[in-house]
Amino acid sequence: LDLTRVATDLRRVTVQGATVLATADLLEFVVAAAAATWPEQPPQLDGLELAGPLLLPDDPGGSGGPGDPRPGGTLQLVLDEADTHARGQAPAPAKLRLFVRRSADEPYRLWASGSLRFDAAVPEREQPRTGLDAIVARCSRRDDERWSRLAARGVALPGPRPTSLRAGTDPGELLLGLERTGPAARRLPIDAIEAGLWLIAELAEDPDAPPIPGQLGDLAQVSSCIIADGDRQGPPTWLHLQLARPRGDAPSGRDERTTHALLTLYDDAGRICLQLGVTRRSDVAPALARRLADAALPDWLYAREWEPAPALSPEPADLEGAVLLISDDRELARACIEPAHTRGAALESIDAHDLVDRSACHDALRRARARGPLRALILALVADVDDDALEALVRERARLILDLAAALHNDGGRLRLLLVTRASQPAIVEPSGAPTITVAGLAAAPAWGLTRAIGLEHPAIEVRGLDLAAAPSPEDPRRIIAELTTDDREEAVAYRGDQRLRLRLRRAPITTDREPTPLPPRLGEGTTLITGGLGGVGLQLAAHLADAGARRLLLLGRSPL
């Protein structure tokens, strides 16, 4: 095959006077051309080796110049015919060599070599056993343009061969082999994600595919994304797709509750390279729309509310291993040593002011691990602060938390992170009471959001928050260690006096006959930031705060004015 007009099927970009033919598009063209040679079976590119980049000169005078669809050179594709084979058996791979010459005066030189492999022919009466087999079989059709594009990008979703496809016990579970070449294997595998999401969509879009549990329609929302450290993992080798939908008795066999998909990429050693959670919105939208249409306004509004929680068991729980305590209050740190030792933990205490950068955080983790397996990390941000130092302290604590997050991510391992603050949460015992507002509490409040983000980014780190009362109590050290070892799964706990409180969502009452509650003087004098402040709710909230006494409002949002 002499592919002298190959550029008609390629995108071209000009870089420093040379035409660069995109490798992915060229390989797609090669696969399509080879498929046309053997119309009965679609080939797949295997073991491609590139001798170097393909650069063809621009010719301003005509052929190959900017805007001309032809390259200023010639590509030649040589395919050695595959061995003949009996029906139902896979043929030997066909050798592929791609030559290029820049002009008619130059000889051809080898640019790429590889082989084309062929799936074994399926007997006429044999039908796929599950919908997963059916969709993998569809991926091998030569007329599927999207499949060719994905395969040409270096992601090969193989056919149903035992060495590269494993179906789990649940028919909604699929494991595919990924074949990637070149330095792109070390980059974020966006093409592999696209391949998995495309497979999910195809499961529901193909009317001929047998139904399987967990079919997905249009993919509308990425609910989670976990990217592992690229220096620790090899290139992704396996793509694991798991579909799950709750059982129900919906009409026509369709469940209108949420459908979830979990897409995971593994390397050869089984380490996770990337994990992506996806939810299907189309299952939820109709039912949600009906609920909203039938609901009254009070049904939509919820508020965070602190309620009494069961007291912890007085029996000490075992906490064998090392515990790292990072605190800005030395007295509290010293008081935690005895209750920690009582629980069997080796406590390594470090002053938060000494962790000036990320390397210091790494050193702190190493010192703690020298005492034994690291089980937990306590971050106590409870020190008093002057009004003038509030902004600087908030910035410094944010820097500390981000450095700790990076150090924990690189360090690896499972542990529990307990954030300890004082009066940073509006936890009150009586509904008619008012929360205590202190400068120390305001300085520590942003840490709750940052640490919760750590738990979302790194599932191996279990994050909890403990808010102590504004006035120190002799019971505070015991409570800290007790909350560290409890297994009641409360993520937000506060102590007010002797009472233990937990955070819950409750339906919020609507009061339309009250005057706006005046803001505390400290908040009224400062600047109030409203994220999403340019939307309908944000503008209404801004007007309410202005009526309540806020002097300066900063509205941040993406809605146009």
Image: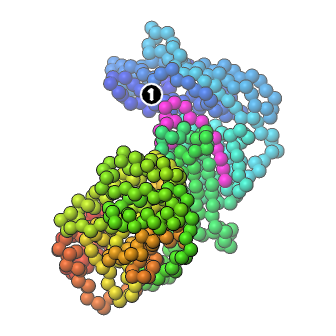
Give the quarter of the image for residue 180. Answer: top right
Residue at the extreme bottom of the image, as rendered: 513
For numbered disc 1, what is the local secondary structure?
strand
Q: What's the magenta region?
A: 173-189
- Horizontal and vertical percent for residue 516? 26, 85
Q: Amino acid at mark 1?
A: Leu
Color scheme of the displayed model: rainbow
Residue at (38% x, 50% y) in the render? 361
The quarter of the rendered structure image containing the C terminus is bottom left
Where, by quadrant of the figure, is residue 431 drawn?
bottom left
Label 1: which residue? Answer: 21
Residue occupying image coordinates x 67% and y 45%: 136
Instruction: Report the residue at 59% width, 69% height from top.
Output: 257
**In front of the other: 532 or 202:** 532
Q: What is the tally of numbered marks visible in this picture?
A: 1
Front one among 104 and 61: 104
Of residue 374 and residue 547, the one placed in the foreground of this image is 374
Q: Nearer the viewer, residue 112 or 366?
A: 366
Q: Is residue 211 above or below residue 406?
A: below
x, y percent for residue 2: 56, 19
Q: Is residue 21 magenta?
A: no
Q: Give above or below for 156 relative to 294.
A: above
The quarter of the image holding the N terminus is: top right
Q: Position of residue 454 (x, y in %)?
A: 43, 58
Height in image: 212 above or below 476?
Answer: above
In the rendered image, is residue 549 in sight?
Answer: yes
- Would residue 34 be seen by someone viewing this image from the given angle? no
- Reply above or below: 438 against 209: below
Q: Residue furthest top?
A: 105
